[in-house]
């Protein structure tokens, strides 16, 4: 009487097929994750800059911090930088005239470069 099961050849063929599929899928997955992070960063920067501009248009001065945008309901919360995974890593650029406030522009505090070769700090 013969016991039922898989032969060694069948198992090796199945593992070879599985490894082939993984070698194709995994690099695409991680590439898509990086693309999603970059898209999220661009969108977060756009939303925060838009809120800063609206604050200036409404009050005639720039906010003193990103927290002011949340307190005055221009933002629901300070977004998390998708590259650093922190909401405190944003780089704040002040306006030329300090009497107008403290937050003229915001940039990512992430080190490194995007897929297109530009630095995250240049966005």
Image (cartoon, rainbow, N blue to C red):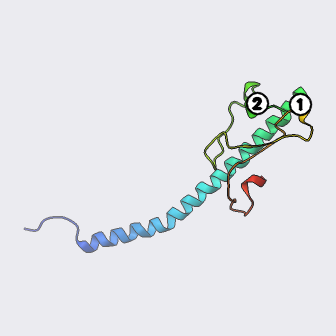
Residue 64, position as x, y percentages in the image: 80, 31
Residue at the image position 85 percent from the left and 36 percent from the top: 53
For the point 41% across and 68% down, which residue is it? 19
Tell me the SS state at disc 1: loop
- Disc count in the image? 2
Residue furthest out toward the top? 72
Instruction: Answer with left or right where residue 10 lies relative to residue 92.
Output: left
Q: Quadrant of residue 27?
A: bottom right
Task: Please report contact status of discs 1 and 2: CB closer than 8 Å, yes or no.
Answer: no
10 Å neighbourhood of mark 2: few (<14), some, or many (≥20)? Answer: many
39 vs 15, left or right, is right
User: Which of pointers 1 and 2 lies earlier in the amino acid sequence?
Assistant: 1
Q: Whole-percent x and y of residue 65? A: 77, 33
Q: Choose between 20 and 41: the one closer to the eye.
A: 41
Question: Of helix, strand and loop, which one carries label 2?
Answer: helix
Instruction: Give me the C-alpha separation between circle 1 and circle 2.
Output: 12 Å
- Please identify the quadrant where the N terminus is shown: bottom left
10 is higher (above) or lower (below) than 78:
below
Judged from this view, the residue extending furthest toward the bottom is 9
The spot of residue 108 in percent (x, y) is 72, 48
Vertical arrangement, residue 85 with respect to residue 60, above or below: below
Which quadrant of the figure has residue 98? Answer: top right
Residue located farthest toward the left when viewing the structure as drawn: 1
Which numbered dot is residue 69?
Answer: 2
Residue beneath disc 1: 61
For the point 33% across and 72% down, the residue is 13
Indicate which disc residue 8 carries: none
């Amino acid at each position: 009487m013969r016991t039922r099961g898989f032969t060694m050849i069948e198992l090796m063929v199945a593992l070879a097929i599985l490894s082939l599929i993984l070698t194709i899928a995994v690099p695409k997955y991680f590439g898509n994750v990086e693309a999603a992070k970059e898209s999220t960063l661009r969108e977060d920067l756009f939303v925060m800059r838009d809120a800063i501009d609206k604050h200036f248009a409404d009050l005639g001065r720039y906010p003193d911090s990103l927290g002011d945008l949340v307190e005055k309901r221009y933002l629901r919360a300070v977004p998390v930088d998708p590259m650093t995974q922190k909401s405190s890593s944003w780089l704040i650029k002040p306006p030329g005239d300090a009497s107008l406030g403290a937050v003229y522009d915001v940039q990512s505090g992430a080190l490194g470069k995007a897929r297109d070769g530009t630095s995250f700090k240049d966005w």
